[in-house]
Each structure stands twice: as structure tokens, then as C-alpha cells.
Image (tube, rainbow, N blue to C red):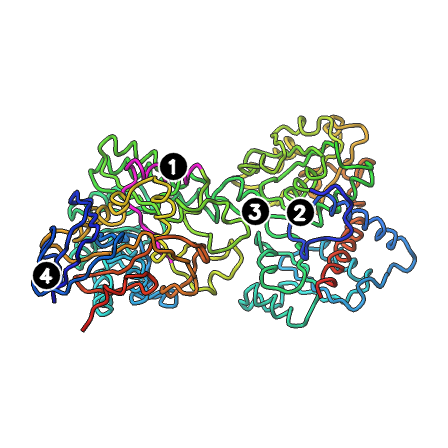
């Protein structure tokens, strides 16, 4: 790992946090600072990606990630087009590769993809000429979410190294956990992952994080408490007995938050289930940075798009 | 037509033979085996130095896909793939469309195999009608039609009761029940070995115990009934322990492993190449090492490939949506050489036991040995021949292999079935002398 400052990304795609090193992560975050400033202007637009085409390919329902990417692309003056599964050729039985190749025949520069299958972005990166940005693949990764989370933490804490970050919830099915665990440990933070034993993946420790089933233990001395969404379908049957018991054991309420540092921040990638994983007074309280995450998402995605576009320009 | 194979290293573990011998083939049978046999009008083929004359290899676990999925493989292309890989016989799984659950389908398979006339094809019948796990097939009728074993492969025998009845009933015909060990509730929609790699990749896991729980159930039932259970494509150390325990108690249990399970681990699935997706999945290093040890110490009876052809279009999908399975017939010999012979785990006699004598014994079919009067099914192996696996050049109709581009050693130089040379490997120096001449 290089300690010197990066001036560009070596990768053409952003599929996983594994694709970028410490210096490159810092470059993205630093670039996002400037991008955030663009969003504060009265005319929120720069010509950086003028003439470039970005395709937003969303095979899964998504509101915030899709809109965040769209806004980021527009603020960079890129031409964008979007496709969601409803009404598309996918419902007619077209394969992912065929869909991507069809869109690619229109010569886009970048494809932002969200898909229910882990590895879908990798698959596209093998068959497409465009830069692929993973906007969430199955239960694998969601790298721009981890970057915007890191940006938000750094903005509040001034650093990432040395922080204690608790990530709580459905660890087994969370792509947010995987990307965050890789990024935060790379940047020198320590991560404790907490969730019910039925939702802790076998071999989680190999991600460089410690795991616990005690919410109190996870919150103890934390600088950051990051709550993960628990899908409703996990709430019945074999993973969890009930919402009621889940909130009792793993929900973040004001009492539990007291175990964290007094200046600890509370995060959630959204969408939240109030009263399931997080109490409303905490979600809306002074320690919550949940809406900052949304705002920062645009700036961080602008940075990623800008840096990857610079890379593809050099390859021409 | 008489042929005399002169001075080959004949390795026949069933006969306890390993040395330089001459083998005289006449009328499709082994006429004589001995030192310095007289040509006596036979065409003399001097076996190149270093080549091995082995009883024909038998792959007891292949999917020929015909009838019903001829876009993946046919009895013709699968048979051609078999002899190219050095197999003189294959046993084909019943999960065709329709399922081989009645004599008419068995007869169709045998008719096609006879027309193709390359490898011997031994059909395996279904345990239950449609492999649906409810009603026993007419196992006696399947046996009479030519089935050599029964299985619901592709899935496990549905219930413990059905397995009990299958073991009891099949024992009347001295047929093994081959089991695809997998607890369906534990496997669920998993697509990779449950462990750190799947956790990192975000792939749903198939736990090791999904296999071993079923193996333990079946071994207990074999113990109770006295029937013969054969554990197919065993992949985890927990199952191997169950097999060892069963054998030590005298249970009639045998097992097989596939070359990919002792060659690769779940590390290979990083990158989401769907040609690394098979069922059971590639397991972790401790399992791979345990299988190697089981092959060495004799706990594992057979190496079978689980040859599972799939069309390229079917594999060009997201990892979790692609079908399980890889082709194996044409890569078995070099993988065995690389992982078992070259590191000194086992010697050639043991390998030939695993690939020929043991499957012949388990399925109770001819071959597996080179004896006077026996069928002249012989595989000539060039153990030192360099080979580079090229997916595009596989003879199988499907090219789904994770070993594309691997440079290895060891190949079938020639494959002889019933005294007829059905395959000569033109890329092996010296193999051309096995070519039949008019």
C-alpha cells in the first residue's frame, strides 16, 4: 500500500472497495470536498463530464442511490439515461450480458449498475468496454455507500484512523457492511460488527472485524454507531422470531446510545425502519448524521464519476 | 484381428500386476498376458517406453443429458468425450428429460450407445418415479433392462423411509443406491461453500453439514438394512469421517470424489466465474486436504468426474443464477497426475484402482482388470505427456471447465474398447502406433 498521495485512480471500474487502496480512498474523499462545494453554489453545475454519457442500470428498486447518482451526473454535466427493470427487455427474458451489450452499443462511457446478484458488476466489467460502477450487487458490496459513509465520518471526526465503529444489524445480507468493513479497516479504524447469531456470516472475522451478539458491548465506547436495515422478510420464520424481540435485543435507543462516546455519531444507509432497528428519537436526534449521509452521497458520487472518467480519458 | 501389445508397463491392481508384459488381444477379448508372447500372426504394437497399459478407466458418474437436453451433450458427444479422456466405460445419471425411471428409457439409452459404439454406457436408473421422492421405480425391470445402480442424483433421496426401502429393495438385485448427499433445507438456495470466501463475495452458502448429515443418515440406513449405499461426489471432511466410521463398523458403504474437489478450493470462485460453480460446491482447503488423505489411505473408493455439461449460454449468467456443474471426462487424467501422482500421494496402481477396478467392482460390471478371457477394454496412458487444457478444444459438446489454459502432464494415448481402438491421441508422441490399420 502506497503512502504517497494518489493523483488518479488506477482502476477503470469501481466494483469493490478492494479495487482501491488507502491513497485512492483519500483521493476520492478529498475530491468529494471540492464537489460538495459545487453543491453549495447557486448554479450547482460544472462542465467536468460534458459530452460524456452515463447509463444508470438499475435492476433492483432503488430511490436514494439512483437519484443520488443521477444528480451527481447532472451536476457534472454528463448526459445520462436510466433503465429500471420494469418495462424493460429484462422482463422479456433478456440476459444481463445482452442488456448491457445492447446499451453499450450506444457508446456510453460509464455504466452504473444495481443488481440483485452478487458479482453482477464483475460480470459486466468482463464483457463491457465502459467503466462499471457498482451501485450495489446482491449481498456483496456497495462501494460508493462506504465512501460516502467514510466522508461523513471524516467530516465530523476529522479522521478515520483510530476510530471505533460499531455496525449493527443484518450482517449476513448486508452489502453496506462488507464495503464499510473493507474501507474502514483499510483506513485504520476498528470495526465491531453486531447482530443476531443467525445473521452473522461464517468467517466474518476474515473481513478484519470483530463480531459480537451483544448490542451493549458493540456500543461501548463507540465513535460511530452505524445501523443497518433489517429486511421485513427476515423478520418472520427462521432468522428472527419477531420485530419486537429484534428491537429489544438489537434496536438503537437513547439508553443504549449512552454507552457510546458522548460525541458519537449515529448513521444509517437508509431506508430506515423506525422502531425496528432504530428509535425515532435517536434517528432524529442531535447525534444523527443520517441526512448528512444523503447529502454527501451526491458529492462522493460526483468524485467517483469524475475520477473514473479521468481514467477512461487516459485510456483513449 | 489379433493385436499384440508388446512390452508395456501393465498395471492391473485387481490382478496384483505391475510390470513389463505383453498383452494379446483377439476377438475383442484378452487372449493372453505374459512375457515375450509370440506374435503368432498378430499385428505387433511396441508400447512406447514409459507408457502404461491399464484396464479401461470407468467413470461411474457422468451426465450424458440425452434424452432431453441434447443442446448440452448427447450420448454420442459424451461417449466421444469419454474415450478422449481415456474412459472405456461410463455410467450415466438418470436425471435426463424424461428421467430414466423405466425400462423403455434405459433401452433407448443403450440403443443410442450401441449405435454410437465408442465407450460402454451403463445406465443408472432412478430410485423414485420422476426422481420425485415418492414412489419406488420398477427397480427389477430397470435392472433387467440394463441399469447397474439406482439414484435420484441431482437431488437426494427425499426421505429416510424412501432411502430405507430403496436400500432394501435394491439389495435383492445386488445394486448399489448412489446418493447425492444434501439436506435440502440446509442447502436452500445456496450457491457456494459456506465460509469466509462466500461471506466476502456475498454468496449464499451451502454448509458442509448439508452433505454430511445426509451421508450419516444413509450410512445408518445401510447399516440397518444391509444394503449398499454409495456416496457420490463427496466433498467435505465430515462426510469422509462418517464413511470411515461406517466402514469400520462393517457397513456396506463406498464413496467417490471428483477431481475438481481435490484440485480446487472455494478460493477459485473469487471473480464469480460460473465455471467454478458446481454442486457440491468447491470446499475449503481443510476439506481438499482431507480428500487427498482419504485417497491416500484407502477410505475413498473411487474417483468419478461428475461430468456435468452445460451450454455456454446457460453459464453466461450471474453466479447465483447459473446452473451447477462442470465437464470432467477430458481433464480427469491430468488432474489426477498433478494432484495425486506428482506430489507422491499415491502411485499408479492405486490411481488405476480408483479409476477402474473399484468402479467395476461397485457397479458389478465387466472390466476393471486385464485378465485372459476378459473384455479387451484397455487405456494406454502417457503419464509424462505435456498437455494444455483448452476449453474450446474439448470434444464434449459443452466447454464449461474452470481448467482452461492449465498446463499439466498425463493423457490417454489410446483407448481400446472390446479390442477396438476407439481413440488415438494425435498430440501424444508415439501414440500413432496404436492406430488401427486396414
| Chain letter of the residue beneath label 1 in the structure image | B
Q: Which mark is residue B290?
A: 1
Q: Nearer the viewer, mark 1 or mark 3?
A: 1
On screen, residue B268 versus residue B117, left or right, reads right
| Chain letter of the residue beneath label 2 in the structure image | A
Query: Which image quadrant for residue A222?
Result: top right
Q: Which sits in the foreground, B269 or B408?
A: B408
Q: Which residue is mark 4?
A: B39
Q: Nearer the viewer, mark 3 or mark 4?
A: 4
Taking the magenta stretch, the answer to whether it contains residue B225 is no
Q: Residue at x 19, y 65 (%)?
A: B420
Q: Which residue is mark 2?
A: A17
Q: Residue at x 15, y 46 (%)?
A: B172
Q: Are marks 3 and 2 on the same chain?
A: no
Question: Looking at the image, is B83 positioned above or below residue A142?
Answer: below
Q: Are marks 3 and 4 on the same chain?
A: yes
Q: Nearer the viewer, mark 3 or mark 2?
A: 2
| Chain letter of the residue beneath label 4 in the structure image | B
Q: Are marks 1 and 4 on the same chain?
A: yes
Neighbour class for label 1 at 10 Å: few (<14), some, many (≥20)?
some
Query: Which image quadrant for residue A272?
Result: top right
Asked whether the beta carbons under mark 1 and mark 2 sit within 8 Å of each other, the answer is no
Neighbour class for label 2 at 10 Å: few (<14), some, many (≥20)?
many
Amino acid at each position: 500500500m502506497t503512502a504517497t498521495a494518489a493523483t488518479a485512480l488506477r482502476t477503470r471500474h469501481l466494483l469493490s472497495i478492494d479495487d482501491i487502496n488507502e491513497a485512492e480512498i483519500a483521493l476520492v474523499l478529498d475530491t468529494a470536498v471540492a464537489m460538495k462545494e459545487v453543491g453549495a453554489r447557486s448554479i450547482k453545475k460544472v462542465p467536468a463530464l460534458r459530452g460524456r454519457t452515463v447509463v444508470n442500470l438499475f435492476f433492483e428498486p432503488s430511490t436514494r442511490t439512483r437519484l443520488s447518482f443521477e444528480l451527481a451526473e447532472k451536476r457534472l454535466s454528463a448526459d445520462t439515461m436510466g433503465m429500471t427493470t420494469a418495462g424493460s427487455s429484462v422482463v422479456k427474458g433478456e440476459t444481463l450480458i445482452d442488456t448491457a451489450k445492447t446499451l453499450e452499443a450506444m457508446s456510453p462511457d460509464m455504466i452504473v449498475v444495481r443488481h440483485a446478484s452478487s458479482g453482477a458488476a464483475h460480470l459486466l466489467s468482463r464483457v463491457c468496454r465502459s467503466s462499471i460502477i457498482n451501485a450495489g450487487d446482491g449481498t456483496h458490496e456497495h462501494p460508493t455507500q462506504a465512501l460516502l459513509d467514510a466522508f461523513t465520518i471524516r467530516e465530523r471526526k476529522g479522521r478515520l484512523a483510530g476510530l471505533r465503529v460499531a455496525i449493527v444489524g443484518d450482517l449476513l445480507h448486508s452489502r453496506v457492511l462488507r464495503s464499510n468493513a473493507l474501507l474502514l479497516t483499510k483506513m485504520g479504524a476498528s470495526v465491531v460488527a453486531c447482530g443476531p447469531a443467525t445473521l452473522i456470516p461464517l468467517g466474518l472475522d476474515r473481513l478484519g472485524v470483530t463480531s459480537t451478539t451483544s448490542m451493549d458491548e458493540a456500543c461501548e465506547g463507540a465513535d460511530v454507531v452505524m445501523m443497518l436495515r433489517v429486511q421485513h422478510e427476515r423478520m418472520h420464520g427462521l432468522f428472527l422470531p419477531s420485530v419486537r424481540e429484534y428491537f429489544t435485543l438489537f434496536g438503537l435507543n437513547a439508553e443504549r446510545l449512552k454507552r457510546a462516546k458522548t460525541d458519537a455519531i449515529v448513521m444509517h444507509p437508509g431506508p430506515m425502519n423506525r422502531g425496528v432497528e432504530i428509535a425515532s428519537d435517536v434517528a432524529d436526534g442531535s447525534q444523527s448524521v443520517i441526512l448528512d449521509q444523503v447529502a454527501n452521497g451526491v458529492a462522493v458520487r460526483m468524485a467517483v464519476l469524475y475520477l473514473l472518467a479521468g481514467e477512461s480519458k487516459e485510456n483513449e | 484381428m489379433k493385436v499384440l501389445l508388446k512390452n508395456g508397463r501393465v498395471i492391473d491392481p485387481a490382478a496384483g500386476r505391475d510390470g513389463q508384459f505383453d498383452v494379446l488381444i483377439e476377438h475383442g477379448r484378452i487372449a493372453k498376458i505374459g512375457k515375450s508372447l509370440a506374435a503368432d500372426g498378430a499385428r505387433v504394437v511396441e508400447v512406447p517406453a514409459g507408457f502404461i497399459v491399464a484396464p479401461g478407466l470407468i467413470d461411474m458418474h457422468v451426465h450424458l443429458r440425452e434424452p432431453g437436453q441434447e443442446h448440452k451433450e448427447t450420448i454420442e458427444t459424451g461417449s466421444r468425450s469419454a474415450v478422449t479422456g481415456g474412459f472405456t466405460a461410463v455410467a450415466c445419471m438418470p436425471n435426463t428429460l424424461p428421467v430414466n425411471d423405466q425400462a423403455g428409457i434405459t433401452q433407448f439409452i443403450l440403443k443410442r450407445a450401441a449405435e454410437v459404439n465408442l465407450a460402454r454406457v451403463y445406465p443408472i436408473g432412478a430410485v423414485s418415479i420422476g426422481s420425485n421422492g415418492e414412489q419406488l421405480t420398477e427397480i427389477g425391470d430397470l435392472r433387467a433392462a440394463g441399469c447397474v445402480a439406482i439414484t435420484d442424483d441431482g437431488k437426494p433421496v427425499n426421505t429416510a423411509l424412501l432411502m430405507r426401502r430403496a436400500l432394501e429393495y435394491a439389495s435383492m438385485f445386488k445394486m448399489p443406491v448412489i446418493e447425492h448427499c444434501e439436506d435440502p433445507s440446509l442447502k436452500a438456495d445456496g450457491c457456494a461453500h459456506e465460509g469466509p470466501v462466500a461471506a466476502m463475495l456475498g454468496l449464499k452458502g451451502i454448509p458442509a453439514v448439508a452433505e454430511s448429515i445426509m451421508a450419516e443418515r444413509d450410512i445408518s440406513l445401510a447399516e440397518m438394512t444391509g444394503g449398499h449405499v454409495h456416496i457420490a461426489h463427496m466433498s467435505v471432511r465430515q462426510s469422509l469421517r462418517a464413511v470411515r466410521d461406517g466402514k469400520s463398523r462393517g457397513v456396506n458403504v463406498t464413496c467417490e470424489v471428483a477431481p475438481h474437489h481435490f484440485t480446487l478450493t472455494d478460493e477459485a470462485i473469487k471473480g464469480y466465474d460460473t465455471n467454478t460453480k458446481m454442486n457440491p460446491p468447491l470446499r475449503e482447503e481443510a476439506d481438499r486436504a482431507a480428500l487427498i488423505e482419504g485417497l491416500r489411505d484407502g477410505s475413498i473408493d473411487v474417483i468419478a468426474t461428475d461430468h456435468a455439461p452445460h451450454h455456454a449460454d446457460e453459464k453466461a449468467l450471474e453466479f447465483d443464477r447459473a446452473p451447477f456443474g462442470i465437464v470432467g471426462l477430458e481433464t480427469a487424467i491430468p488432474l489426477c497426475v498433478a494432484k495425486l501422482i506428482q506430489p507422491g500421494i499415491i502411485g499408479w496402481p492405486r490411481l488405476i484402482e480408483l479409476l477402474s477396478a473399484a468402479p467395476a467392482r461397485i457397479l458389478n460390471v465387466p472390466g476393471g482388470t486385464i485378465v485372459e478371457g476378459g473384455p479387451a477394454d484397455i487405456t494406454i496412458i502417457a503419464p509424462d505427456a505435456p498437455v494444455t487444457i483448452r476449453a474450446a478444444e474439448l470434444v464434449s459438446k459443452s466447454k464449461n471447465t474452470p481448467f482452461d489454459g492449465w498446463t499439466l502432464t498425463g493423457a490417454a494415448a489410446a483407448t481400446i474398447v472390446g479390442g477396438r481402438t476407439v481413440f488415438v491421441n494425435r498430440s501424444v508422441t508415439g501414440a500413432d502406433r496404436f492406430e488401427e490399420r486396414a
